[in-house]
Image (tube, rainbow, N blue to C red):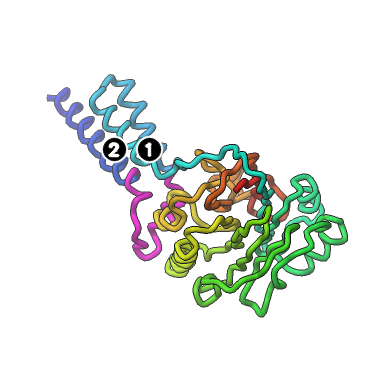
Amino acid sequence: MRKDGQQQQQSTFLILLIVISALLAALPYVPWLAGGIVPKVQAFASWLLLVPLGALILTMLKRKRRTAVVFVVLLVIGLIPQVHMAPSGQSESTAELRVLSFNAYRAEASSNELAALIKEVQPDLLILVETNERLHKDLTSLGALEGLDFRTAQAPAGGVRDTVIFSKNPMTEIDSGLSERDTGWFAMPTVEVDVAQQRVLVAGVHVYPPLKDAKRWRRGLSAIDTWVQAHSESPMILAGDFNSTRGHRLYTDAVAGLAEASGLRPQATWPQGMLPFPVIEIDHIIGQAVTFSQAGATPVSGSDHLAVHATARF
């Protein structure tokens, strides 16, 4: 009787593990907000897959092969949204942009370190989020903005924008569907950049975080989705702080079909400095009709985000 009781307990435990693992595997596919709870949990969807991974190892050790197969299937289901199916690569095109995007954390990031990074990367396109004119003045005095002669409106611009795009190439700021009325928060500047005699659309992105108001976060991603669909035939770059990971169904829907600079595997960018290392990727460089190479992420003291950079070829 005691042996039968132990076997029953083990079976109950395995069934519970299968149910929990199935829920975690399904998490990145859920589009609902559930009062804001789902987006918060989805942000860590990749880390939560450690549960079915641990269960797989346990069942393999106990030689329960059929049960192990179940956990393998659940792991694959959970990993599919986390793996970007359009990896970075090389292109023969001569139309090229070096892109650097950084959330300067209310402009409190170290201007010296940021200037050094800009000089190292030598971007053709610089997107600064949570920035202000004081930081730009400091960067100018340090020689970091030399050659980046074209830029969008000041930030804050009447309190409706906190993002600025700088460019070495001639560009024109355009009206778009990413105004503060569309996003429900800050407006996202959009421009047309001339690259090797072709027009490239660029958007500087900052989406409201889902930690506070998930409906406003959804509204920002919906505005991006609408904007991308409206320009489905145009080469484009979107870069900035999306406050979203590949575990968010609403994010993957918004950028479906676009290439991601970080490639197959997510590049964690947040929260820098709060933990021994960043754990989730919420800062992205993505594009349409583009391939990426030389992607990377670099810390700058004073900010809780890593700066992300990549070379885009159209």
Q: Residue at x 59, y 62 (%)?
A: 203
> From the viewer's perspective, is 118 left or right of 194?
right
Residue 153 lies, in percent from the top left, at 70, 72
Tag 1 or tag 2, which sits nearer the N-term?
Answer: 2
Q: Residue at x 40, y 45 (%)?
A: 81
Return the mark for residue 17: 2
Residue 111 lies, in percent from the top left, at 79, 57
Q: Residue at x 83, y 57 (%)?
A: 146
Q: Is residue 253 visible?
A: yes
Q: Give the prevailing secondary structure in the magenta stretch.
A: helix
Residue at the front extreme, as displayed: 197
Mark 2: give few (<14), some (14-19) or many (20+) Cα within 10 Å: some
Return the mark for residue 51: 1
The answer to whether residue 92 is above or below residue 108 is above
Mark 1: give few (<14), some (14-19) or many (20+) Cα within 10 Å: some
The amino acid beneath tag 2 is: Leu
Q: Nearer the viewer, residue 273 or 163?
A: 163
The answer to whether residue 139 is above or below residue 295 is below
Magenta residues (range) = 25-47
Asked if the residues shown at circle 2 and circle 1 are in contact, with their CB atoms under 8 angstroms apart, the answer is yes
Q: Secondary structure at mark 1?
A: helix
Residue 28 lies, in percent from the top left, at 38, 49
> From the viewer's perspective, is 60 left or right of 122?
left
